Image: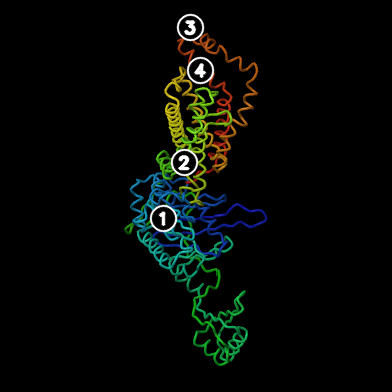
C-alpha cells in the first residue's frame, strides 16, 4: 500500500505550488496511473514522495515513511526519466555498479538483464542503446532490489506500440505478484487501457480517484474526427440536421486546425451521409475515443491512515499481517561503497587512459630535463620542470579524483532525477581510499617509468639512489594523494569535474604563494630545534632516531606546496561536509 498524504511543493515566487495538498493511495496488487496534462505536477509529486523535492507532506510505503526504511532500494524501485549512465559503460557494468549501491549480489544484474530482454546486449555500451532498450535497462535498475513498490515517471513516453505493450505487461506481472505500481502518464486512453485505478491531477490538485471502468465512463467519449476543407459548411449542416431530428450532437472546431472537426453524439455513417447530401468534400472520417478533460468524480479512495501509524495491514492468504515498525535510523547506502567506487572507476576507460597519458608525458619530460643538467634528481624522477605548477603524475591524480565525483554528477549511477548516490561519510571515505590508492599507484609507476627511461638513455650512473629516499618517497606520495583528494573534494562541492581540477591547480598557483609569503618570517625559524624541545617536554630518553624523522617531517610540512595542499584540503573538506552531508539523505 502506498499512501501519499498532503503532498505540497515549496511555493515558487509569484506562482502557485506545482503540487498543492495532494492525497491519494495506490493499493497493492494493482497498477495505478497518475494522470495529468504536461505541467499538472505529476513528476513533482513523485519527487516529493521520494524526498527529492522540498515541500510538505508524507508518503507511507506499506506503513513506513521513507526515512524509516532501512534499505530503500529493496522496498522502492524508481525510474525517473532515462538511465543517465556513462555512454562508455556497458549495460552489465552499469547494473553491477547499481547492485553495489543497492546491496544485492552482482549476479542479480545478469538475472534482470534476461528478464527485461537485454541478455544478448549485456556487453553493449549505453551510448549505443535505443530508447526502448534504455527504458528496459532503467526497469532492470528499478527491479534490482526486488522492490514491492514501483514508481515510474512516464515510462511509455516515446516507445513504440510493441515496446509499450511489453512494458505494461511487465508492470501487470509485478502487480500480479502483490506489488504496487504507480506510473505517470498524460494519455487518458493509455490510463484507461492499462491501469486498474486512475488518479487524475490538474494544477497540482486531486481531481478524481477512480477505478478504470468508472474513469473510462466519465472521462472518455466516442467521437468522429472529420477533416474537410469546408469545415464551416459541414458544421452548419450537421447542426441544422441535428436540430431538425432533435438529436444531441455537438460539433467542435479544433483550435489551430481549421480543417478539422470533432463531432460528438454521431457516427461515421451519419456524418458521411450529411456531407454527401450537402456536397462537402471529406478528406478523412474516423471513429475515435475523445478526452473530455479533467472532470471531478466521486472518490472511492479509503481514508488514509493516521500520520503516526506504525504499520498498515496487508491481506495475505485471506488474513492480515502487520509489519513491525523499524527503529528510526539513517539510510546507509550504498551498502558496499568501496565495491561501488571500484566498479565506477574501472567500468570505463578513463582511468587507464589517464594513466597512460601521464606515463608518456612524464617520460617525455624527464629525458630532456636530464640532458640540460640543471634539474636535481628528485625533479627528474618526478618529471617536474620549473615551468609546470605540478608534475604530470600529480595532475593525473587530481584528474582521477575530480572524475570520481564529477563523472558521477554528469552520469549518475542511479536515475538522475532520483538523485545521485548519497553524499554520506561511507561513500566519501570509500572515494578517498580508492582515489588515494590510485594516486599512489600512478605516482609509483611514473617514478619507475622515468627511472627506467633515464637508465636506458643515459646509463645506470645517471640515476643513483638518493640517501634520503624515504623522505622523498613520503613527500612524493603525499603530493599525489593530496592532489587526488583536492580534485575529489572540489568536484564534490561544485558538482563538476573542471571545478575539481581548478582546486588542484590552485594549490601551487594561488594558495602556495600566499602560504610562502605567510611563512617567510619568525614563525619559520621557530621550527628549528623542534625535536630538542619535544625531547625536553617528553622524556630524557627520547630516541635520537626520532629526531631525524621529526626533522624530516617538519621540513616537509614547511614546504610551501605541502602547507598549501594541507590548507586547501582542510578548507575543501569542511566545505564538503557543510554543503553535502548536511542535506537530507538521498537514496
Q: Which residue is mark 1?
A: 137
Q: Position of residue 530 (x, y in %)?
A: 55, 13
| Vertical position of residue 279 compared to residue 158: above or below | below
Q: Mark 3 to mark 2: distance in Å?
A: 50 Å
Mark 4 or 3, closer to the camera? 4
Q: Mark 4 to mark 3: distance in Å?
A: 21 Å
Residue at the bottom extreme of this rendering: 277
Mark 1 or 3, closer to the camera? 1
Q: Is residue 114 left or right of residue 138?
A: left
For marks 1 and 3, the one nearer the N-term is: 1
Marker disc for residue 330: 2
For marks 2 and 4, the one nearer the N-term is: 2
For marks 1 and 4, the one nearer the N-term is: 1
* Disc 4 element: helix
Q: Mark 2 to mark 1: distance in Å?
A: 29 Å
Mark 2 or 1, closer to the camera? 1
Marks 4 and 3 in Cβ contact (< 8 Å): no
Q: Which residue is mark 3?
A: 540
Please rate how many residues cluster around mark 2, counting C-alpha atoms within 10 Å: few if below 14, some from 14 to 19, many from 20. Answer: few
Q: Position of residue 74 (x, y in %)?
A: 40, 49
For marks 3 and 2, the one nearer the N-term is: 2
Amino acid at each position: 500500500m502506498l499512501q501519499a498524504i498532503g503532498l505540497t511543493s515549496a511555493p515558487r515566487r509569484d506562482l502557485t505550488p506545482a503540487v498543492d495538498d495532494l492525497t491519494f493511495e495506490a493499493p497493492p496488487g494493482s497498477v495505478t496511473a497518475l494522470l495529468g496534462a504536461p505541467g499538472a505536477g505529476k513528476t513533482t509529486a513523485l519527487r516529493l514522495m521520494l524526498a527529492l523535492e522540498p515541500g510538505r507532506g508524507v508518503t507511507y510505503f506499506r506503513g513506513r515513511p521513507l526515512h524509516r526504511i532501512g534499505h530503500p532500494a529493496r522496498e522502492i524501485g524508481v525510474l525517473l526519466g532515462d538511465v543517465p549512465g556513462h555512454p562508455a559503460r556497458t549495460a552489465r557494468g552499469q547494473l553491477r555498479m547499481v547492485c553495489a549501491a543497492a546491496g544485492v549480489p552482482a549476479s542479480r544484474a545478469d538475472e534482470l538483464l534476461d528478464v527485461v530482454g537485454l541478455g544478448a546486449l549485456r556487453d553493449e555500451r549505453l551510448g549505443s542503446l535505443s530508447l526502448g532498450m534504455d527504458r528496459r535497462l532503467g526497469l532492470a535498475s528499478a527491479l534490482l532490489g526486488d522492490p514491492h513498490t514501483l514508481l515510474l515517471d512516464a515510462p511509455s513516453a516515446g516507445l513504440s506500440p510493441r515496446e509499450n505493450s511489453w512494458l505494461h505487461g511487465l508492470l501487470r506481472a509485478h502487480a500480479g505478484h502483490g506489488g504496487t505500481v504507480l506510473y505517470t502518464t498524460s494519455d487518458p486512453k493509455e490510463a484507461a487501457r492499462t491501469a486498474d485505478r486512475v488518479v487524475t491531477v490538474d494544477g497540482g490538485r486531486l481531481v478524481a480517484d477512480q477505478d478504470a471502468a468508472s474513469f473510462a465512463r466519465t472521462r472518455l467519449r466516442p467521437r468522429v474526427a472529420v477533416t474537410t476543407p469546408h469545415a464551416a459548411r459541414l458544421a452548419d449542416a450537421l447542426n441544422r440536421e441535428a436540430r431538425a431530428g432533435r438529436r444531441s450532437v455537438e460539433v467542435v472546431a479544433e483550435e489551430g486546425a481549421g480543417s478539422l472537426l470533432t463531432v460528438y453524439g454521431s457516427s461515421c455513417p451519419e456524418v458521411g451521409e450529411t456531407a454527401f447530401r450537402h456536397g462537402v468534400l471529406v478528406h478523412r472520417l474516423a471513429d475515435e475515443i475523445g478526452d473530455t478533460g479533467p472532470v471531478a468524480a466521486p472518490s472511492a479512495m479509503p481514508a488514509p491512515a493516521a500520520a503516526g501509524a506504525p504499520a498498515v495491514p496487508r491481506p495475505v492468504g485471506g488474513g492480515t499481517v502487520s509489519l513491525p515498525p523499524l527503529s528510526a535510523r539513517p539510510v546507509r547506502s550504498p551498502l558496499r561503497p568501496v565495491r561501488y567506487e571500484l566498479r565506477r572507476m574501472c567500468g570505463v576507460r578513463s582511468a587507464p587512459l589517464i594513466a597512460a597519458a601521464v606515463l608518456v608525458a612524464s617520460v617525455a619530460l624527464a629525458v630532456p630535463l636530464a640532458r640540460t643538467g640543471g634539474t636535481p634528481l628528485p625533479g627528474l624522477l618526478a618529471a617536474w620542470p620549473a615551468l609546470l605548477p605540478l608534475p604530470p603524475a600529480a595532475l593525473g591524480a587530481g584528474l582521477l579524483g575530480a572524475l570520481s565525483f564529477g563523472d558521477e554528477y554528469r552520469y549518475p549511477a542511479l536515475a538522475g532525477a532520483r538523485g545521485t548516490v548519497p553524499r554520506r561519510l561511507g561513500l566519501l571515505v570509500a572515494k578517498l581510499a580508492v582515489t588515494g590508492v590510485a594516486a599512489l599507484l600512478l605516482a609509483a609507476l611514473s617514478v619507475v617509468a622515468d627511472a627506467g627511461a633515464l637508465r636506458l638513455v643515459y646509463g645506470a650512473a645517471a640515476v643513483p639512489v638518493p640517501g634520503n629516499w624515504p623522505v622523498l618517497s613520503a613527500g612524493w606520495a603525499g603530493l599525489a594523494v593530496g592532489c587526488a583528494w583536492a580534485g575529489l573534494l572540489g568536484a564534490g562541492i561544485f558538482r563538476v569535474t573542471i571545478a575539481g581540477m581548478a582546486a588542484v591547480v590552485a594549490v601551487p598557483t594561488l594558495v602556495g604563494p600566499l602560504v610562502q609569503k605567510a611563512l617567510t618570517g619568525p614563525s619559520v625559524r621557530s621550527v628549528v630545534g623542534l625535536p630538542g624541545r619535544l625531547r625536553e617536554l617528553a622524556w630524557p630518553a627520547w630516541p635520537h632516531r626520532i629526531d631525524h624523522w621529526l626533522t624530516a617531517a617538519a621540513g616537509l610540512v614547511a614546504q610551501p606546496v605541502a602547507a598549501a595542499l594541507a590548507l586547501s584540503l582542510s578548507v575543501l573538506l569542511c566545505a564538503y561536509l557543510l554543503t553535502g552531508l548536511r542535506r537530507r539523505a538521498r537514496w
